[in-house]
Amino acid sequence: MAGSTKSFLADAGYGEQELDANSALSGLDKGLRSGKLGEQCEAVVRFPRLFQKYPFPILINSAFLKLADVFRVGNNFLRLCVLKVTQQSEKHLEKILNVDEFVKRIFSVIHSNDPVARAITLRMLGSMASIIPERKNAHHSIRQSLDSHDNVEVEAAIFAAANFSAQSKDFAAGICNKISEMIQGLATPVDLKLKLIPILQHMHHDASLASSSRQLLQQLVTSYPSTKMVIVTLHTFTLLAASSLVDIPKQVQLLLQYLKNDPRKAVKRLAIQDLKLLANKTPHTWSRENIQALCESALHTPYDSLKLGMLSVLSTLSGTIAIKQYFSSAPGTTTTTARSFDLVKLAQECCYHNNRGIAAHGVRILTNITVSCQEKDLLPLEQDAVFGLESLLILCSQDDSPGAQATLKITLTCMVKLVKCRPHLSQSVVESLLTQLHSAQDAARILMCHCLAAIAMQLPVLADGMLGDLMELYKVIGHSVTDKKQELLVSLATVIFVSSQTALSSEIKTVIKQQLENASNGWTAYRIARQASRMGNHDMARELYQSLLTQVASEHFYFWLNSLKEFSHAEQCLTGLQEDNYSSALSCIAEALKSYHKGIASLTAASTPLNPLSFQCGFVKLRIDLLQAFSQLICTCNSLKTSPPPAIATTIAMTSGNDLQRCGRISNQACMKLSMEEFRNLATRYGDLYQSSFDADSTTLRNVELQQQSCLLISHAIEALILDPESASFQEYSSNGTAHVESEYERRMMSVFNHVLEEVESLNRKYAPVSYLASNAFRYHTACLCSAVIALLKVPLSFQRYFFQKLQSTSIKLALSPSPRNPAEPIAVQNNQQLALKVEGVVQHGSKPGLFRKIQSVCLNVSSVLQSKSGQDYKIPIDNMTNEMEQRVEPHNDYFSTQFLLNFVILGTHNITVESSVIDSNGIVWKTGPKTTIFVKSLEDPYSQQVRLQQQQGQPPSQQQQQRTAYSRF
């Protein structure tokens, strides 16, 4: 559990001095040259860690060449160690610069008299197939070794042949006949045939090759009916079809035929496994007849294990477009009700099966049918699904075994899915959950609490009814300090926070605090406080953070908790805002700002070089500036009310040509215009924070987006009510409906947005611009602005997950060449030459790469700025004074490189900045950084300098020099 905060707060290793790449490589090289075998092996196996730490080509190239030397001169055990390192570091192989030299050193061992050495070499070549797919000498050695009399060498050749077939079309086409002859040859042992057949799965490079391989597999599956041969051949058949795509419908039919007709359970299990693979990969290729055949097999099989597998395939298909194809009536047939279909009968029959897995798949199929086929009359199916879910809930909530918990997860997921699409079923689902919550095991209670929280987020109307039952349960949890109890305390508190739509009552806070004092540790209290901050219950969060301040050992943790306490106190100050009391609002905002300033100081102290807390600091600074802008707007509105425009304001406006003069002297001071620009600037900064948060979860990003929209809304309201009513338009900021609202905070913010828009539009219709002279009109307009500010502030701010946890971690490391020895030292370039700047980069991931979004490409922007000119200003013809270039590169195995050609015509020192940003799979640009800077000093080339000096002395250049001038252009 403590690991979840590591990315923000852990300061382990802070201040440690790491060896640079050359020192690390030298240390390993020393081990390789040792006379002791143990030290050599230890040095070899440490190379993958070195590659992970310094993943750039210059080091990886040197390291692999050293390993190739060890492979060439070492014994077989060392070769085996080098082979394992190569296989572990497969994604770094393409960074080897001297591929020819590397392969030459490895390949020299293929001529050894030792068959084991040759076998290890073949496996080494197979592991390198991605970088040498078309090496003919490697192809020839593999073909030769397939005819070897040594089994170890033949197996190694088979391994290499499979890898090269996957990478090289030429090799696959050339080896296909050889493999076919060996498989069909009578002299080839059966166990060797079983190893040769899987090579055919890679014969998908063109249609003719795939077709010939498929014909061979068809012959094999008919000619060799033994169980092992059929299993291996069918599986290779499936993988080949999945890669070539065109033969998938035929393969589904073949597998269904074996599933129905072959009496062997092993073959049936293999058919089910492959059908599941095809259902996941290409569900759209399954016809109605395929699904019907699978249903019939499931209905008639007497074996529960086989029925479970078939239902697993059907439940996978039921969540895809295949289910719509199944229920769509064929042309010329009469429409049938959903209950008459075999799939529905099967699901209903399995819902109450004594095997939990079969029952779980049955209710999942019913749920998916109910959700997907909404146009059909499915009322009986809805009830069947609810009853099946409730029975499984009762069965699994009393069992603590892992199997029961896995089934319970499926059940609860189906409940959330069903309630989301069929809200009228929610009441009975919630009642059954609350009933079972009291008697369930702790592990089941935790999962049920997560389910209740998800339902309450979707349907807030149900939340109030849960609160009483939840509080009763919270009181009787018990005083155990086991991990399950601690997790249950957090889960129950989360549901209580979600259910309390308004502020927590004193009774609820007392109960929670009592339980935390009796049965919790500090980590549990922190997690509950964190949940309170996410749900907007800042008073509860502040008290919990306060109690934890003295329970941490690190000063960084202390400052982190202190900052959270201050932020919670600041947001709590804003809960006392009242609709029409603007002076009270100003004092509340001032008090909140005071706490926020204390909090940002603590937050800065909590950051370390390894954990700079950049998102948190940026978010809080924006919140401070937003509160200050709100305060300034209320003050401006008060000033506008106390000094309305003079009677001649319209005449002055017409005379001066400035419509803002109609608003009086306040407008002359441009306070309102400045305020509007301030809110637009804040919206831009929120947009920048959004773009820099590539690793944030979608809820956090939506929270930032709502803050940005609130700034745009107020800016637009100022323009519409005060500055320029005619050009103001609200289409850009209008809500597109609340169908996709995911949290209570978003729901309340969208409600405020809509209300403010309606008020502003109403005022614009009621008071035309010409009526600005009336003081009443100004009173209504300023009151609308102040009410909008107070309404936005009254919605408790939600500190979302990314503020506390970083579940996905992505960073980019850049290396520039040429690069100076000293970062402050410039690179010398003559002004008549171009600098070739090579930019290499590595994408580094945390433990869960691609959890929220993945990098599709990296955008590199290179710009140069002249920092200082040389002493004398010469008249040099300038074609291009600046360098502004951008390139997009796609990382391969998390590595990318590209080059830029830069001109430095002006003499002097130039500052080159290389900035990277990433583009995700949806095409959205994220400004993740980093930004790297180097200096270049542009020098005058010697010949131009000589010509210039001669011209200054009044000497015409010689004929030879003139000829050189003409040729110097080339």
Image: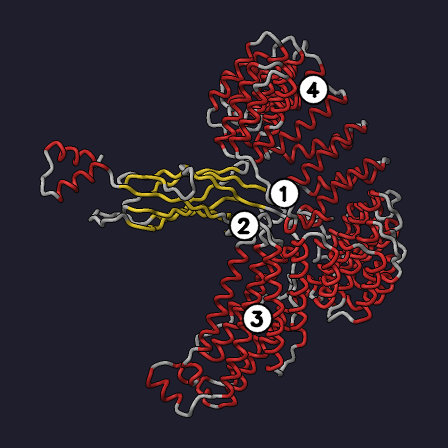
- Dot 3 or dot 2, earlier in sequence: 3
Residue 922, numbered label: 2
- 535 over 944 or under it: above or below: below
Tell me the amino acid under the disc marked 4. Leu
Splitting the image into 4 quarters, where does residue 296 fall?
top right
Mark 4 vs mark 2, CA separation in Å? 43 Å
Q: Between marks 4 and 1, how big is the CA–CA gap?
A: 51 Å
Q: Is residue 415 above or below residue 29?
A: below
| Badge 4 element | helix
Q: Residue at x 85, y 52 (%)?
A: 481
Mark count: 4
- Residue 85 seen in render: yes
Comes first in the chain, label 1 or label 2: 1
Which is nearer the N-term, disc 4 or disc 1?
Answer: 1
Dot 4 corresponds to which residue?
194
The residue depicted at 32 percent of the width and 49 percent of the height is: 882
240 displayed left or right of 812: right
- Which mark is nearer the camera, 3 or 2? 3
Image x and y of residue 541, in percent: 72, 64
Crowd around label 2: few <14 · some 14–19 · many ≥20 (10 Å): few
Q: Secondary structure at mark 1?
A: loop
Q: Label 1, on which residue?
A: 13
Q: Dot 2 lies on which element?
A: loop
**Contact between labelled residues 3 and 1, with CB atoms less than 8 Å apart:** no
For marks 4 and 1, give the one nearer the viewer: 1
